[in-house]
Image: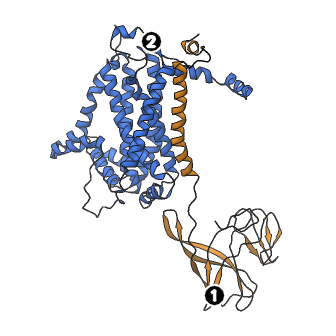
Chain colours: A blue, B orange
């Protein structure tokens, strides 16, 4: 066995990569405050695994999508857990990304590592895009209207709105082409994009270093990533995982019924992470609607873009 | 030397670092099991056996004696979340006024559809060359068992069949 390991590691930089990942001195030493990013990574892994498992059963067609998901949830062993984990994992991802940004903002770390921060905003937007394109895939009442309203909002964006609507819907109305597109965007476009940005984010953070504590005195002392920080990371990730399992068991996603445009008793309401747009549209009516549809979301992310020092040519 | 290996040098005693490393292993194993077991269970699972139902194949009063006939009919198929009519076919052989044999059209070797060759008077599978007599016996090729018969009955000259499938590639006839 040992000679095989040696044969492999002589030809492939396993130890170098391991050291690159694990041998890091953290200014001020390890801290539970720095565990959010790794928990997001763990959830990303969880989303990939549960996503692939769902692909074993899911079909992206408007006549069978809902039934295929219901079959997974009711007939397949642990199918309920797989689907619910993907659902709650998505919510946890959005929540933890926001928490991660608040943490980095509070510590002032974004000032020292602006590129890492900018890639972080790209990650937030990609996560939101995944959240948006994921919901309609079930083609249930909730998902259908999330897609209908969401693509209508995209259609109201000044100038490019019409094109965006066609790009997302594959036409002017919600149809099979829309479901195919949401599926392709969710699985084939935004997941690889997220993986790419995560890679860039980590590379950038390992190149520019980390912010560390705001107290300059504490910065002088350093602590190792392995195993001190890794232990804290894994502890928190385990707790996050347990919370997710508890959510799946005690708060499973309701079966909302197959998308039905004739039933008028259903009142569509978006997921919590898109509620702010929903509310904004109640304030901006008539000709002002594009402000709610495009202005408010843009304004929400503006402080994030504005915060760190922008790149400048040296004089 | 880095701080990592330096801290591990105190043999015999459980250092704080060793303890952390052990705990990391425990957490990772726990997470792996919590994710791994459901994942594997969800993939290594099979769809339930279909309920057997009699399907009407058609009128057989005009079939010639000892001339295998390929007959198509519709069954209501329950395939996971799909409930729909699908067309199946069977080989029907009339032995006498009232005696019939119904063969599943699926070769017992690896699941291809075999054909009747009127010239040689044999069933022949185009995939790997299995040859069967009109009674379904193997006379050539790799097939491990005779052709599979299907339960059938005749009512007023109309043939009814219980469509089922069997595991291929083995010498026993096992329903799947």
Residue B104 seen anywhere in this rendered image of the structure: yes
Q: Above or below — where is A47 with respect to B22?
A: below
- In front here: A75 or A67? A75
- Label 2 crowd (10 A; few <14 / some 14-19 / many >=20): some
Mark 2 secondary-structure assignment? strand
Outermost residue, right side: B139
Say which residue label 1 marks: B154
What is the quadrant of the C terminus of chain A in the image? top left
- Look at the picture and state if B91 lies above or below A105: below
Give the distance between the C-alpha atoms of the residues marked 2 and 1, in whole angstroms.
87 Å
Residue drawn at (74%, 72%) of the image: B147
Q: Quadrant of the N terminus of chain A?
A: top right
Between tags 2 and 1, which lies in front? Answer: 2
Label 1 crowd (10 A; few <14 / some 14-19 / many >=20): some
Identify which residue is drawn at 69% across, 22% down. A10
A79 with respect to B155 (left or right):
left
Subunit ID for the residue under disc 1? B
- On the question of residue A193 being in view, the answer is no
Residue A29 image offset from top left, x and y in percent = 43, 15
Query: Residue B26 location, x and y as percent?
Result: 53, 32
Image quadrant of residue B45? bottom right
Q: Nearer the viewer, residue B22 or A27?
A: B22
CB under 8 Å between discs 2 and 1: no
Q: In which quarter of the image is residue B75?
A: bottom right
- Residue A161: quadrant of the picture: top left
* Residue nearest the viewer, comparing A106 with A169: A106
The residue wearing badge 2 is A222
Secondary structure type for disc 1:
strand
Measuring from the top left, give residue B84's x and y in whole percent.
Answer: 50, 70
């Amino acid at each position: 066995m040992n000679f095989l390991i040696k044969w492999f590691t002589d030809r492939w930089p396993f130890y170098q990569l391991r050291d690159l990942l694990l041998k890091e001195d953290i200014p001020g030493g390890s801290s539970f405050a720095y565990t959010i990013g790794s928990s997001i990574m763990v959830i990303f892994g969880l989303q990939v695994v549960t996503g692939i498992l769902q692909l074993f059963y899911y079909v992206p067609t408007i006549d069978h999508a809902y039934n295929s998901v219901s079959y997974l949830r009711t007939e397949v062993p642990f199918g309920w857990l797989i689907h619910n984990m993907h659902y709650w994992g998505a919510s946890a991802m959005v929540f933890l990304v926001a928490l991660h940004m608040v943490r980095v903002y509070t510590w002032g770390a974004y000032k020292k590592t602006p590129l890492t921060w900018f890639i972080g905003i790209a990650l937030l937007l990609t996560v939101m895009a995944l959240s948006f394109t994921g919901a309609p895939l079930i083609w249930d009442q909730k998902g259908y209207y999330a897609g209908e309203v969401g693509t209508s909002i995209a259609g109201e964006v000044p100038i490019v709105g019409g094109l965006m609507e066609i790009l997302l819907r594959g036409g002017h109305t919600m149809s099979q082409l829309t479901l195919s597109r949401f599926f392709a965007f969710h699985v084939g476009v935004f997941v690889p994009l997220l993986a790419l940005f995560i890679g860039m984010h980590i590379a950038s953070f390992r190149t520019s270093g980390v912010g560390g504590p705001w107290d300059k005195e504490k910065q002088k002392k350093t602590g190792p990533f392995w195993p001190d920080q890794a232990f804290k990371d894994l502890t928190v990730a385990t707790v996050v995982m347990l919370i997710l399992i508890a959510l799946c068991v005690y708060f499973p996603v309701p079966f909302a019924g197959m998308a039905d445009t004739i039933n008028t008793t259903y009142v569509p309401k978006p997921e919590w992470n898109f509620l702010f747009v929903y509310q904004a549209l109640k304030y901006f009516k008539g000709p002002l609607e594009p402000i709610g549809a495009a202005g408010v979301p843009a304004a929400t992310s503006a402080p994030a873009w504005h915060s760190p020092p922008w790149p400048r040519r040296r004089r | 030397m880095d701080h990592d290996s330096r801290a591990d040098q105190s043999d015999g005693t459980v250092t704080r670092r060793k303890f952390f490393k052990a705990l990391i292993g425990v957490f990772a194993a726990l997470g792996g099991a919590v994710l791994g077991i459901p994942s594997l269970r969800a993939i290594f699972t099979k769809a339930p056996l279909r309920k057997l139902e009699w399907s009407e194949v058609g009128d057989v009063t005009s079939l010639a004696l000892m001339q295998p006939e390929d007959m198509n009919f519709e069954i209501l198929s329950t395939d996971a979340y799909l409930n729909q009519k699908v067309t199946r076919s069977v080989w029907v052989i009339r032995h006498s006024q009232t005696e019939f044999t119904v063969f599943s059209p699926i070769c017992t070797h690896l699941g291809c559809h075999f054909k009747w060759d009127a010239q040689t008077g044999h069933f022949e599978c185009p995939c790997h060359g299995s040859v069967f007599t009109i009674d379904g016996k193997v006379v050539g090729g790799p097939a491990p068992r005779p052709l599979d018969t299907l339960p059938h009955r005749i009512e007023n000259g109309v043939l009814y069949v219980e469509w089922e499938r069997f595991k291929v590639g083995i010498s026993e006839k096992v329903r799947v």
